[in-house]
């Protein structure tokens, strides 16, 4: 059932997430496989640009439609993107540690920005959600196989933030009325999965060589991404079922109280 997002809750969540964030072990001895290092450095440079390094904001031509759709939502969106900027800073720290110059632009990122700008905020929000799900799979594999202590710590901090962003995306979709019923539900789930695997395939086409060089496999990456897509959809449905039963319990309690008063 569509409802307003609890903006106070999300402002508090983003504030809470700023606490207890130790800096990565920047000065720990470097521990990287020399054969994988060039591919890792290239991959991290692209992520440093794409993960909060560009315009850290909703940039769709109609972005204000979403931002101003309820009081306080602009603040929540800004806090979300502040964390994205932080990801770029953390990845920049890794580039400095490895002696790599950040990149100023990349054709795939420019294309992503163009599509986000022109296809509208609804598309942009879904594209960002799917990017966050696919990137979560990427950072998990990087943390698992990377070896370097600072890389491990950066991935842990980003993964912690992205888990919160995915909770926010679910709350945003639930507020918009998800999960829908009947054919709308079928359509939404199908297109979400198809677009999700497309986003994962785009990520793998650019960064798969780095992940493979570190020891990860395509089936590990797509398995991780698939589990994330499924869990995301399942949690929306579970969340909606829980709020429906809470609402029904509230109605029954009110009916019971009314009967007692009248009797
Ligand atoms: Fe991010
Ligand atoms: Fe994010």
Image: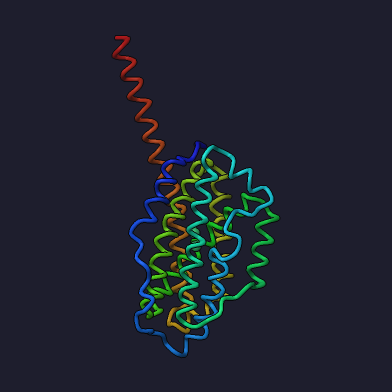
Instruction: Give residue 25's position: percent from left, percent from top.
Output: 35, 74
Q: Residue at x 42, y 73 (%)?
A: 141
What is the quadrant of residue 30 in the picture?
bottom left
Instruction: Give residue 186's position: percent from left, percent from top.
Output: 55, 49
Instruction: Give residue 224's position: percent from left, percent from top.
Output: 44, 67
Residue farthest to the bottom?
Answer: 35
Of 119 and 180, the residue lying toward us: 119
Q: Is residue 138 above or below residue 67?
A: below
Instruction: Give residue 263's position: percent from left, percent from top.
Output: 29, 9
**Residue 198 appears in the rendering:** no
Left or right of 90? Residue 255 is left
Q: Residue at x 34, y 30 (%)?
A: 249
**Residue 47 appears in the rendering:** yes
Q: How many marks?
A: 0
Left or right of 28? Residue 110 is right
Of 55 and 180, the residue lying toward us: 55
Of 123 and 58, the residue lying toward us: 58
Residue farthest to the top?
Answer: 263
Q: Is residue 92 above or below residue 238?
A: below
Q: How is the image coloured?
A: rainbow
What is the quadrant of residue 158 in the picture?
bottom left
Q: Residue at x 58, y 53 (%)?
A: 125
Q: Residue at x 54, y 59 (%)?
A: 130
């Amino acid at each position: 059932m569509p409802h307003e997002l609890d903006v106070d809750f999300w402002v508090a969540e983003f504030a809470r997430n700023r606490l207890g964030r130790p800096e990565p072990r920047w000065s720990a001895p470097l521990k990287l496989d020399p054969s994988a290092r060039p591919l890792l450095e290239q991959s991290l440079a692209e992520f440093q640009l794409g993960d909060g390094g560009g315009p850290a904001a909703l940039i769709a031509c109609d972005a204000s439609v979403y931002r101003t759709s309820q009081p306080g939502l602009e603040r929540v969106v800004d806090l979300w993107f502040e964390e994205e900027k932080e990801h770029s800073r953390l990845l920049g720290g890794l580039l400095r540690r490895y002696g790599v110059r950040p990149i100023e632009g990349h054709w795939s990122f420019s294309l992503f920005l163009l599509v986000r700008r022109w296809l509208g905020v609804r598309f942009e929000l879904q594209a960002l959600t799917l990017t966050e799900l696919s990137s979560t799979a990427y950072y998990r594999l990087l943390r698992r196989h990377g070896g370097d202590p600072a890389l491990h710590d950066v991935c842990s901090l980003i993964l912690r933030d992205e888990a919160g962003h995915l909770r926010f995306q679910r709350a945003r979709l639930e507020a918009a009325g998800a999960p829908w019923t009947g054919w709308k539900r079928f359509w939404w789930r199908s297109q979400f999965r198809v677009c999700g695997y497309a986003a994962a395939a785009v990520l793998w086409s650019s960064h798969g060589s780095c992940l493979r060089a570190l020891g990860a496999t395509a089936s590990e990456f797509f398995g991780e991404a698939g589990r994330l897509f499924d869990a995301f959809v399942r949690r929306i449905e579970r969340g909606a079922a829980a709020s429906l039963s809470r609402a029904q319990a509230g109605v029954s309690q009110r009916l019971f109280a009314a009967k007692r008063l009248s009797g």
